[in-house]
Image (spheres, rainbow, N blue to C red):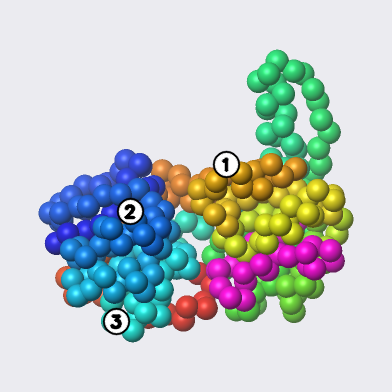
Amino acid sequence: MKVLLTTTSFQDTPGPHHELLRNEGFDLLCAKGPLTESRMLELVGDVDAFLCGDDEVTATVVEKALPRLKVISKYGIGLDKIDTEFVTEKKIPLTFCPGVNHTTVAEHTFALMLALFRKLVEEANHVSRGEWIRVTGNEIMGKTIAIIGLGRIGKEVALRANAFGMKVVGFDLHWDSEFAEKYGVQRCESAEQALIQADVVSLHVNLSGETRDLINRERISRMKKGVVILNCARGEIVNTSDMIEGLESGQVGGYGTDVLDIEPPPADHPMLGAPNTIITPHIGSRTYESVERQATMAVQNLILALRGEKPLAQANEVPLTAHI
C-alpha cells in the first residue's frame, strides 16, 4: 500500500505515531503541506491513501487519484479544504480526528487573549532591545466574552473564561443547554446578539458558506469600541480588509489570530502590518501532546479503513454541519 503523507505537524513531531505507521509496512510518499491543488495533482495517481492536513483535496485531485485511492485520513478536524460531497459520492471513506485538540486550541486562545490585553509581545520586544519601557495593560476579569461556536473547543474556552472571572455569553446552532446551565453560559439567539455585548469575541465555528466573512464591516461597526477578537478557527471567517479597517480606526482594539485567509501568507499580506495584531502560524493544536493524539488517531483511522474495518471517526457518516 502506498500512502501520501502531507501533514507537516505529523512529520516534524517525534512520537509513537511514526512507529505505528512504519510497522504497517506502507510505502510512504512524503511532502510537507499544506499543498495546493496543483501540487497534489503532481503527487496523486498511484497512491492508495492520503494522510493529509489542510491540503486542497478537490474533486479534480480525487478524480485523478481514482481508481486506486481507497481512503482519505484527515489529520485534524477541519474538512473545508476537502470536497466532501465528491468524496462521499465516490464512496471513499473520509476519516477525521474529533476530540483530540480542543484543550490545546483553547489554551492557545487564552495565550492570544492575555498577550493582547497585557501587551506581552510589545513589552518582551522592548526588553530584548534593552529598553525598559513599561506599558499599562488591562485585566480580563469582569470582561464579557462572546463565544461563537460552542463545540468542544468553544466549551473549553468557556471553562477557562469562568476560571478567569469573565462573563460568558455564546451562540451556537446546536445549543447544549445542560452545559450552558452548569457553567453559566448565557445563550444568545443570534450571533449579532452575542457580538454587540462582547468585550472579547472568540471564534470557534467550522468554515462554511454561512460562516465565511462572519466578522465583517457591518458587524464590527455594531460591536463595542475597542473589542478584542480572537480567531483560532479559520482565517476566512474574518474579512481581512474589514478587520484591518476596524483595527486602524480603533473600533477593534486587538486581533489575535492563529489563522489567515492565505497560509502561508505572502510577504505583502496586509494583515502582517496591521496594528494591535498578534498572528501565530496555525499552531493552535501544535503541541507534543496534541500532535501525538491527532497523529495516532489519524494512523489508526487509516489502518482500519484500509482493512475494511470501521474507523474511529468517519466524517462522511456524520452531518457535515455539526460542530466538532
Residue 285 picture location, percent across and down:
48, 51
| Residue pointed to by mark 3 | 90
Toward which corner of the image does residue 40 lie, by quadrant? bottom left
Task: In this rendered view, identify the residue nearer to me: 174 or 25.
Answer: 25
Q: Pointer 1: what residue? A: 267
Q: Is residue 13 magenta?
A: no
- Residue at x-position 68% and y-position 27%: 124
Q: Secondary structure at mark 1?
A: loop
Residue at the top extreme of this rendering: 130
Q: Secondary structure at mark 3?
A: loop
Q: Nearer the viewer, residue 211 or 118?
A: 211
Cβ atoms at labels 3 and 2 below 8 Å apart: no
Residue at the right extreme, as displayed: 225
**In the image: residue 106, left or right of residue 166:** left
Tell me, yes or no, whether the highlighted magenta stretch contains residue 208: yes
Which of disc 2 and disc 3 is earlier in sequence? Answer: 2
Give the SS element for disc 2. Answer: loop
Q: Is residue 47 left or right of residue 170?
A: left
Q: Please, is residue 127 above or below residue 280 in the view?
A: above
Q: Nearer the viewer, mark 3 or mark 1?
A: 1
Classed neighbour count for the residue bearing mark 3: other residues with Cα under 10 Å, few (<14), some (14–19), many (≥20): some
Q: Nearer the viewer, residue 136 or 65?
A: 65
Task: Name the residue tied to disc 2.
Answer: 6
Q: Is residue 228 visible?
A: no
Q: Amino acid at mark 3?
A: Lys
C-alpha distance separating marks 3 and 1? 39 Å
Crowding near the residue tagged with mark 1, few <14, some 14–19, many ≥20 C-alpha atoms within 10 Å: few
Q: Amino acid at mark 1?
A: Ala
Instruction: Say if residue 115 shows up in the picture.
Output: yes
Q: Quadrant of residue 296?
A: bottom left
Q: Position of residue 71 (x, y in %)?
A: 26, 70
